[in-house]
Image (cartoon, rainbow, N blue to C red):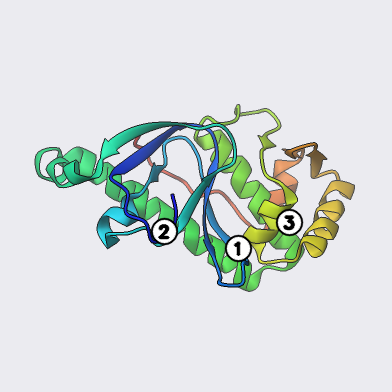
Amino acid sequence: MTEGERNAQLYTVLSGWGFRYKILEDGRRQILNYILPGDLIGLQGNVMLEMQHSVEAMTRMSLCVFERDRLMTLYEKHPSLAYDITWLAAREETMLDEHLLSIGRRSALERAAYLLAFLDWRAKSTGAAAEGKAANLPVTQQHCADTLGLSLVHTNKTFRKLAGDRLIRWLDRGCEVIDIEGLRKLAGWTPPLETKRPFL
């Protein structure tokens, strides 16, 4: 999905990873958040009439398709599902609050630790990774640089430090979290408590 376009569908992610992003006129990209199973894609475009950001797949994805023009029917006839959509939107806002805090106030090392700890938590809480095992996150250092607001060189040096401290290991295409508690402690971050997560 591309910023500015009108799309006739909404999507629920059934499997795979993606991300939401915006691009400046000079080509610089800011990744806003990551999309995992259970997340809803395209709701903003329904409310604002057109997409205010772009969406790209990182891995192969399976999606459930909803016709956008039937959304109001869902609110009118299925209030419990309407509440679930509101829950998903509120949870997204909470995550974006934490991302903004991280970019604005954490050091580069703390930001990197937070991002990987956050992605590990999201992967496990959505079933994209098995609980109790090292999570393999399908992110590149370019993805991370574009999320953290750092240069690729600075990002590489920061991740080498995390790898040297045996908190993570970089793979051919992604990152393996080795010490999740160490990452959380370094970032000063604790995963939020959530009520049962709705799945549309």
User: Judging from the image, what secondary structure is the residue with disc 3 in?
Assistant: helix
- In the image, is residue 200 above or below residue 163? above
Does residue 194 appear to the left or right of 182 in the view shown? left
Marked residue nearer the N-terminal end (1 or 3): 1
Give the residue furthest to the left. 77
Camera-side residue: 107 or 30?
30
Does residue 192 appear to the left or right of 132 in the view shown? left
Residue 38 visible in image:
yes
Does residue 4 appear to the left or right of 169 in the view shown? left
Residue 127 position, x and y percent, is: 52, 30
Q: Amino acid at mark 1?
A: Arg
User: Judging from the image, what secondary structure is the residue with disc 2 in?
Assistant: helix
Q: Are marks 2 and 3 in contact (CB under 8 Å)?
A: no
- Residue name at image x 32 percent, y 43 percent: 10
Q: Which residue is mark 2?
A: 93
- In the image, is residue 67 above or below residue 105? above
Q: Which residue is mark 1?
A: 29
Q: Amino acid at mark 3?
A: Leu
Q: Nearer the viewer, mark 2 or mark 3?
A: 2
Residue 197 visible in image:
no
Q: CA distance from mark 2 to mark 3?
A: 24 Å
Q: Amino acid at mark 2?
A: Glu
Q: Which residue is mark 3?
A: 186
User: Judging from the image, what secondary structure is the residue with disc 1 in?
Assistant: strand
